[in-house]
Image (cartoon, grey):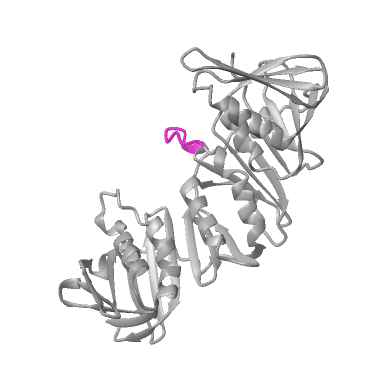
Amino acid sequence: MQFKIKKTEFLKGLRLAQSIADRKSTMPMLANVLLKLEGENQLLVVATDLNVSLSAHLQSKNTGEGGITVGAKALHDIITNLPGEDVEVKRADNNWAEIRSGKVKYRLVGMPDRDFPKVPDPTESQFQNVDASTLRSMIDHTLFSVSNDETRFHLNGVLFESDGDNSRMVSTDGHRLSKIDKALAGGPKLTAGVIIPKKGLLEIKRTLDGIAGNCELAIKTPFLFLQGNDIHLAVKLIESQFPRYEAVIPKNNERKITVDRGLLLDALKRALLMSSETRGVKVSLGEGQLMISSDNPDIGEVKEEIEAQVSGEEVSVGFNPKYVVDILSQISTETVSVEIGGELDPVVIRPSGELDFLGVVMPMRI
Protein backbone atom coordinates (compact mmCIF):
# COMPACT_ATOMS: atom_id res chain seq x y z
CA MET A 1 0.00 0.00 0.00
CA GLN A 2 1.42 3.36 -1.06
CA PHE A 3 0.03 6.78 -2.00
CA LYS A 4 1.12 10.27 -2.99
CA ILE A 5 -0.92 13.31 -1.98
CA LYS A 6 -0.70 17.09 -1.85
CA LYS A 7 0.19 18.33 1.63
CA THR A 8 -2.72 20.81 1.68
CA GLU A 9 -5.17 18.08 0.62
CA PHE A 10 -3.90 15.70 3.30
CA LEU A 11 -4.21 18.35 6.02
CA LYS A 12 -7.82 19.04 5.01
CA GLY A 13 -8.71 15.68 6.52
CA LEU A 14 -6.05 15.41 9.22
CA ARG A 15 -6.88 18.80 10.77
CA LEU A 16 -10.34 17.56 11.72
CA ALA A 17 -9.34 13.94 12.35
CA GLN A 18 -6.71 14.72 14.97
CA SER A 19 -9.18 16.75 17.05
CA ILE A 20 -11.67 13.86 17.08
CA ALA A 21 -9.23 11.01 17.84
CA ASP A 22 -9.38 10.18 21.54
CA ARG A 23 -5.88 10.04 23.05
CA LYS A 24 -7.26 9.51 26.58
CA SER A 25 -9.27 6.40 25.74
CA THR A 26 -8.42 2.99 27.18
CA MET A 27 -8.67 1.75 23.56
CA PRO A 28 -5.34 2.72 21.89
CA MET A 29 -6.88 2.39 18.42
CA LEU A 30 -9.13 5.41 19.07
CA ALA A 31 -6.04 7.64 19.16
CA ASN A 32 -5.28 6.59 15.58
CA VAL A 33 -6.45 7.71 12.18
CA LEU A 34 -7.32 5.20 9.48
CA LEU A 35 -5.73 5.70 6.05
CA LYS A 36 -7.33 3.46 3.42
CA LEU A 37 -6.89 3.44 -0.34
CA GLU A 38 -10.05 3.59 -2.48
CA GLY A 39 -9.27 2.80 -6.10
CA GLU A 40 -6.42 4.60 -7.82
CA ASN A 41 -7.24 8.22 -6.98
CA GLN A 42 -8.87 8.46 -3.58
CA LEU A 43 -7.71 8.20 0.02
CA LEU A 44 -10.16 7.63 2.87
CA VAL A 45 -9.19 9.26 6.18
CA VAL A 46 -11.25 8.17 9.20
CA ALA A 47 -11.18 9.10 12.89
CA THR A 48 -13.62 8.29 15.70
CA ASP A 49 -14.03 8.37 19.47
CA LEU A 50 -17.18 6.19 19.10
CA ASN A 51 -19.40 9.27 19.64
CA VAL A 52 -18.08 11.55 16.91
CA SER A 53 -16.77 10.10 13.64
CA LEU A 54 -15.18 11.75 10.62
CA SER A 55 -14.62 10.39 7.12
CA ALA A 56 -12.73 12.47 4.56
CA HIS A 57 -12.42 11.45 0.90
CA LEU A 58 -9.21 13.01 -0.44
CA GLN A 59 -7.61 13.11 -3.90
CA SER A 60 -4.44 11.00 -4.12
CA LYS A 61 -2.39 8.79 -6.43
CA ASN A 62 -2.46 5.23 -5.14
CA THR A 63 -0.40 2.11 -5.67
CA GLY A 64 -1.66 -1.21 -4.39
CA GLU A 65 -4.54 -1.54 -1.95
CA GLY A 66 -5.32 -1.81 1.75
CA GLY A 67 -4.86 0.54 4.66
CA ILE A 68 -3.06 1.35 7.89
CA THR A 69 -3.73 3.24 11.11
CA VAL A 70 -1.27 5.59 12.82
CA GLY A 71 -1.38 8.10 15.66
CA ALA A 72 -3.63 10.96 14.51
CA LYS A 73 -1.90 13.82 16.32
CA ALA A 74 1.62 12.64 15.47
CA LEU A 75 0.71 12.29 11.79
CA HIS A 76 -0.97 15.71 11.70
CA ASP A 77 2.03 17.41 13.33
CA ILE A 78 4.48 15.67 10.98
CA ILE A 79 2.58 16.56 7.81
CA THR A 80 2.12 20.16 8.99
CA ASN A 81 5.88 20.60 9.34
CA LEU A 82 7.04 18.83 6.18
CA PRO A 83 8.92 21.12 3.74
CA GLY A 84 7.55 20.08 0.35
CA GLU A 85 4.18 20.34 -1.39
CA ASP A 86 3.84 16.59 -1.97
CA VAL A 87 3.81 13.75 0.57
CA GLU A 88 4.42 10.05 -0.03
CA VAL A 89 3.20 7.44 2.46
CA LYS A 90 4.02 3.74 2.31
CA ARG A 91 3.03 0.84 4.53
CA ALA A 92 6.18 -1.04 5.54
CA ASP A 93 6.71 -4.27 7.47
CA ASN A 94 4.89 -4.75 10.79
CA ASN A 95 2.46 -1.93 9.93
CA TRP A 96 5.01 0.83 10.16
CA ALA A 97 4.29 3.90 8.02
CA GLU A 98 7.07 5.51 6.00
CA ILE A 99 6.45 9.20 5.26
CA ARG A 100 8.57 11.14 2.76
CA SER A 101 8.65 14.71 1.51
CA GLY A 102 11.70 16.08 -0.24
CA LYS A 103 14.74 14.89 1.72
CA VAL A 104 12.78 14.27 4.91
CA LYS A 105 11.80 10.73 5.90
CA TYR A 106 9.75 9.70 8.94
CA ARG A 107 8.82 6.23 10.19
CA LEU A 108 5.73 5.92 12.39
CA VAL A 109 4.53 2.95 14.41
CA GLY A 110 1.17 1.79 13.04
CA MET A 111 -1.56 -0.76 13.68
CA PRO A 112 -3.51 -2.96 11.25
CA ASP A 113 -6.54 -1.34 9.65
CA ARG A 114 -8.72 -4.42 10.28
CA ASP A 115 -8.87 -3.50 13.99
CA PHE A 116 -10.22 0.00 13.38
CA PRO A 117 -13.86 0.36 14.57
CA LYS A 118 -16.63 0.78 12.03
CA VAL A 119 -18.19 4.23 11.80
CA PRO A 120 -21.93 4.98 11.37
CA ASP A 121 -23.22 4.54 7.82
CA PRO A 122 -25.37 7.46 6.57
CA THR A 123 -26.46 5.66 3.38
CA GLU A 124 -30.13 5.33 4.34
CA SER A 125 -30.37 8.82 5.85
CA GLN A 126 -32.33 11.55 4.07
CA PHE A 127 -30.04 14.54 3.61
CA GLN A 128 -31.26 18.13 3.25
CA ASN A 129 -29.36 21.12 1.84
CA VAL A 130 -29.10 23.88 4.45
CA ASP A 131 -27.14 27.11 4.69
CA ALA A 132 -23.81 26.43 6.43
CA SER A 133 -23.32 29.98 7.76
CA THR A 134 -26.77 29.98 9.42
CA LEU A 135 -26.05 26.67 11.14
CA ARG A 136 -22.64 27.92 12.25
CA SER A 137 -24.17 31.13 13.66
CA MET A 138 -26.73 29.15 15.65
CA ILE A 139 -23.96 27.06 17.20
CA ASP A 140 -21.94 30.18 18.10
CA HIS A 141 -24.96 31.66 19.89
CA THR A 142 -25.57 28.61 22.09
CA LEU A 143 -22.33 26.65 22.55
CA PHE A 144 -21.00 28.89 25.33
CA SER A 145 -23.84 28.10 27.76
CA VAL A 146 -23.66 24.29 27.54
CA SER A 147 -23.08 22.64 30.92
CA ASN A 148 -19.68 21.03 31.59
CA ASP A 149 -21.04 19.00 34.53
CA GLU A 150 -20.89 15.42 33.20
CA THR A 151 -23.34 14.22 35.87
CA ARG A 152 -26.02 16.34 34.17
CA PHE A 153 -25.62 14.75 30.76
CA HIS A 154 -28.98 16.07 29.54
CA LEU A 155 -27.42 19.56 29.73
CA ASN A 156 -24.13 18.56 28.05
CA GLY A 157 -25.40 19.57 24.62
CA VAL A 158 -27.63 21.91 22.63
CA LEU A 159 -31.29 21.20 21.93
CA PHE A 160 -32.03 21.39 18.19
CA GLU A 161 -35.59 21.77 16.93
CA SER A 162 -36.64 22.11 13.27
CA ASP A 163 -39.90 22.02 11.30
CA GLY A 164 -38.30 22.10 7.85
CA ASP A 165 -38.46 25.89 7.46
CA ASN A 166 -37.43 27.29 10.85
CA SER A 167 -34.98 25.98 13.41
CA ARG A 168 -34.19 26.65 17.05
CA MET A 169 -31.21 25.92 19.28
CA VAL A 170 -31.31 26.16 23.08
CA SER A 171 -28.65 25.49 25.71
CA THR A 172 -28.45 25.93 29.47
CA ASP A 173 -26.17 25.00 32.35
CA GLY A 174 -28.74 25.79 35.03
CA HIS A 175 -27.29 29.26 35.71
CA ARG A 176 -27.90 30.77 32.28
CA LEU A 177 -29.71 29.99 29.07
CA SER A 178 -29.34 30.99 25.43
CA LYS A 179 -31.90 30.55 22.66
CA ILE A 180 -31.77 31.40 18.98
CA ASP A 181 -34.36 31.04 16.21
CA LYS A 182 -33.40 31.15 12.54
CA ALA A 183 -35.04 30.47 9.19
CA LEU A 184 -33.36 27.31 7.90
CA ALA A 185 -35.06 26.49 4.63
CA GLY A 186 -34.88 22.82 3.71
CA GLY A 187 -33.93 21.79 7.24
CA PRO A 188 -34.95 18.44 8.71
CA LYS A 189 -38.55 17.97 9.85
CA LEU A 190 -38.34 16.74 13.43
CA THR A 191 -41.31 15.59 15.51
CA ALA A 192 -39.25 16.25 18.67
CA GLY A 193 -36.06 18.09 19.48
CA VAL A 194 -32.69 16.30 19.60
CA ILE A 195 -29.71 17.05 21.87
CA ILE A 196 -26.36 17.48 20.08
CA PRO A 197 -23.38 16.95 22.45
CA LYS A 198 -20.80 19.67 23.00
CA LYS A 199 -17.85 17.86 21.38
CA GLY A 200 -20.03 17.05 18.38
CA LEU A 201 -20.98 20.70 18.06
CA LEU A 202 -17.33 21.76 18.17
CA GLU A 203 -16.50 19.34 15.35
CA ILE A 204 -19.57 20.42 13.35
CA LYS A 205 -18.44 24.03 13.71
CA ARG A 206 -14.88 23.18 12.58
CA THR A 207 -16.30 21.37 9.56
CA LEU A 208 -18.65 24.26 8.72
CA ASP A 209 -15.74 26.72 8.89
CA GLY A 210 -14.42 25.15 5.68
CA ILE A 211 -17.74 25.19 3.82
CA ALA A 212 -19.04 28.11 1.77
CA GLY A 213 -22.69 28.00 0.76
CA ASN A 214 -24.74 24.93 1.62
CA CYS A 215 -23.97 21.76 3.52
CA GLU A 216 -25.97 18.55 3.74
CA LEU A 217 -27.66 17.67 7.03
CA ALA A 218 -29.53 14.54 8.12
CA ILE A 219 -30.84 13.29 11.45
CA LYS A 220 -31.53 9.59 11.82
CA THR A 221 -31.69 8.72 15.50
CA PRO A 222 -29.36 8.17 17.23
CA PHE A 223 -27.08 10.11 14.86
CA LEU A 224 -26.75 13.49 13.21
CA PHE A 225 -24.91 13.41 9.86
CA LEU A 226 -23.23 16.40 8.18
CA GLN A 227 -21.59 16.43 4.73
CA GLY A 228 -19.69 19.06 2.77
CA ASN A 229 -16.42 19.47 0.85
CA ASP A 230 -15.79 15.68 0.83
CA ILE A 231 -16.00 15.65 4.65
CA HIS A 232 -18.56 13.38 6.32
CA LEU A 233 -19.31 13.78 10.03
CA ALA A 234 -21.44 11.54 12.26
CA VAL A 235 -22.38 12.69 15.77
CA LYS A 236 -24.10 10.44 18.29
CA LEU A 237 -26.99 12.35 19.89
CA ILE A 238 -27.63 12.52 23.64
CA GLU A 239 -30.59 10.29 24.40
CA SER A 240 -32.23 12.20 27.25
CA GLN A 241 -34.97 14.72 28.00
CA PHE A 242 -34.04 18.40 27.72
CA PRO A 243 -35.59 20.66 30.42
CA ARG A 244 -38.75 22.67 29.72
CA TYR A 245 -36.77 25.75 28.82
CA GLU A 246 -39.78 27.98 28.06
CA ALA A 247 -40.75 27.79 31.74
CA VAL A 248 -37.58 29.61 32.87
CA ILE A 249 -37.78 32.48 30.34
CA PRO A 250 -39.61 35.41 31.99
CA LYS A 251 -42.43 36.80 29.87
CA ASN A 252 -43.39 39.99 31.72
CA ASN A 253 -40.39 41.58 33.38
CA GLU A 254 -41.60 45.10 34.27
CA ARG A 255 -38.25 46.91 34.24
CA LYS A 256 -36.74 47.49 30.82
CA ILE A 257 -33.38 49.03 30.04
CA THR A 258 -31.90 50.02 26.68
CA VAL A 259 -28.14 50.51 26.87
CA ASP A 260 -25.14 50.76 24.56
CA ARG A 261 -23.83 47.21 24.16
CA GLY A 262 -20.16 48.24 24.06
CA LEU A 263 -20.40 50.43 27.17
CA LEU A 264 -22.13 47.69 29.16
CA LEU A 265 -19.72 45.02 27.95
CA ASP A 266 -16.63 47.05 28.85
CA ALA A 267 -18.03 48.03 32.25
CA LEU A 268 -18.78 44.40 33.11
CA LYS A 269 -15.31 43.31 32.03
CA ARG A 270 -13.84 45.88 34.42
CA ALA A 271 -16.14 44.76 37.22
CA LEU A 272 -15.22 41.15 36.49
CA LEU A 273 -11.70 41.91 37.76
CA MET A 274 -13.12 42.39 41.28
CA SER A 275 -15.54 39.46 41.27
CA SER A 276 -15.19 35.75 42.05
CA GLU A 277 -17.28 32.58 41.79
CA THR A 278 -19.02 33.44 45.07
CA ARG A 279 -19.02 37.22 44.79
CA GLY A 280 -20.72 38.59 41.70
CA VAL A 281 -21.45 42.04 40.30
CA LYS A 282 -24.35 44.26 41.35
CA VAL A 283 -26.30 46.28 38.80
CA SER A 284 -28.51 49.03 40.23
CA LEU A 285 -31.10 50.90 38.18
CA GLY A 286 -31.29 54.67 38.55
CA GLU A 287 -32.85 57.50 36.61
CA GLY A 288 -31.16 57.47 33.21
CA GLN A 289 -28.27 55.32 34.36
CA LEU A 290 -26.97 51.98 35.57
CA MET A 291 -24.61 51.65 38.51
CA ILE A 292 -22.30 48.65 38.17
CA SER A 293 -20.32 47.69 41.25
CA SER A 294 -18.32 44.82 42.70
CA ASP A 295 -16.87 44.47 46.19
CA ASN A 296 -14.32 41.79 47.02
CA PRO A 297 -12.68 42.02 50.48
CA ASP A 298 -9.66 40.03 49.23
CA ILE A 299 -8.97 42.39 46.31
CA GLY A 300 -10.88 45.66 46.44
CA GLU A 301 -13.94 47.29 44.93
CA VAL A 302 -15.11 49.05 41.79
CA LYS A 303 -18.05 51.32 40.91
CA GLU A 304 -19.01 52.67 37.49
CA GLU A 305 -22.00 54.58 36.11
CA ILE A 306 -23.14 54.28 32.50
CA GLU A 307 -25.96 56.07 30.72
CA ALA A 308 -29.07 54.07 29.83
CA GLN A 309 -32.77 54.41 29.09
CA VAL A 310 -34.47 52.98 32.17
CA SER A 311 -38.18 52.19 32.45
CA GLY A 312 -39.57 50.92 35.77
CA GLU A 313 -38.87 51.20 39.46
CA GLU A 314 -35.37 51.17 40.95
CA VAL A 315 -33.92 47.76 41.82
CA SER A 316 -30.54 46.12 42.36
CA VAL A 317 -29.68 42.73 40.88
CA GLY A 318 -26.59 40.58 41.41
CA PHE A 319 -25.21 38.05 38.94
CA ASN A 320 -22.06 36.40 37.64
CA PRO A 321 -20.68 39.00 35.19
CA LYS A 322 -19.00 36.38 32.97
CA TYR A 323 -22.41 35.01 32.00
CA VAL A 324 -23.57 38.41 30.78
CA VAL A 325 -20.24 39.08 29.02
CA ASP A 326 -20.64 35.80 27.11
CA ILE A 327 -24.14 36.78 25.95
CA LEU A 328 -23.17 40.33 24.98
CA SER A 329 -20.20 38.97 22.99
CA GLN A 330 -22.64 37.13 20.68
CA ILE A 331 -24.73 40.24 19.99
CA SER A 332 -23.82 42.58 17.13
CA THR A 333 -26.43 45.35 17.52
CA GLU A 334 -25.31 48.74 18.81
CA THR A 335 -27.71 48.63 21.76
CA VAL A 336 -29.22 45.84 23.84
CA SER A 337 -32.45 45.45 25.77
CA VAL A 338 -32.21 44.21 29.37
CA GLU A 339 -35.42 43.07 31.06
CA ILE A 340 -35.50 42.77 34.87
CA GLY A 341 -38.25 41.64 37.23
CA GLY A 342 -37.35 41.62 40.91
CA GLU A 343 -33.95 41.27 42.54
CA LEU A 344 -34.20 37.46 42.53
CA ASP A 345 -35.83 37.03 39.11
CA PRO A 346 -34.00 35.88 35.95
CA VAL A 347 -32.67 38.68 33.72
CA VAL A 348 -33.39 38.61 29.98
CA ILE A 349 -30.96 40.15 27.48
CA ARG A 350 -31.80 40.67 23.79
CA PRO A 351 -30.38 42.58 20.82
CA SER A 352 -32.41 45.79 20.45
CA GLY A 353 -35.06 45.44 17.78
CA GLU A 354 -34.33 41.76 17.13
CA LEU A 355 -36.29 38.81 18.44
CA ASP A 356 -34.29 35.84 17.13
CA PHE A 357 -31.80 35.63 20.04
CA LEU A 358 -32.05 35.99 23.80
CA GLY A 359 -30.00 35.14 26.85
CA VAL A 360 -31.27 34.51 30.36
CA VAL A 361 -29.09 34.88 33.48
CA MET A 362 -30.10 33.63 36.91
CA PRO A 363 -29.50 36.14 39.75
CA MET A 364 -27.05 35.87 42.66
CA ARG A 365 -27.53 37.14 46.19
CA ILE A 366 -25.15 40.05 46.75
Q: 232 or 83, which lies in front?
A: 83
Residue 299: x %, y % from top left = 48, 17
Residue at (34, 67) in percent of width and height: 81
Q: 141 or 322, which lies in front?
A: 322
Task: Assess whether residue 101 is covered by the magenta stretch.
Answer: no
Give the quarter of the figure containing the C terminus. top right
Res 42 seen here: yes
Residue at (66, 34) in percent of width and height: 265
Of all residues shown, which one is farthest toward the left? 94
* Left or right: 311 as drawn, with respect to 129: right
Above or below 176: residue 118: below
Residue 306 in which image quadrant: top right
Residue 158: x %, y % from top left = 56, 44
In the image, the segment drawn in magenta is: 147-154
Task: Assess whether residue 151 is covered by the magenta stretch.
Answer: yes
Residue 361: x %, y % from top left = 63, 28
* Left or right: 361 as drawn, with respect to 183: left
Residue at (25, 49) in percent of width and height: 26
Residue 364: x %, y % from top left = 59, 18
Residue at (47, 33) in percent of width and height: 152
Q: Main secondary structure of the magenta part?
A: loop
Res 193 seen here: no
Give the quarter of the figure containing the N terminus. bottom left
Residue 195 in which image quadrant: top right
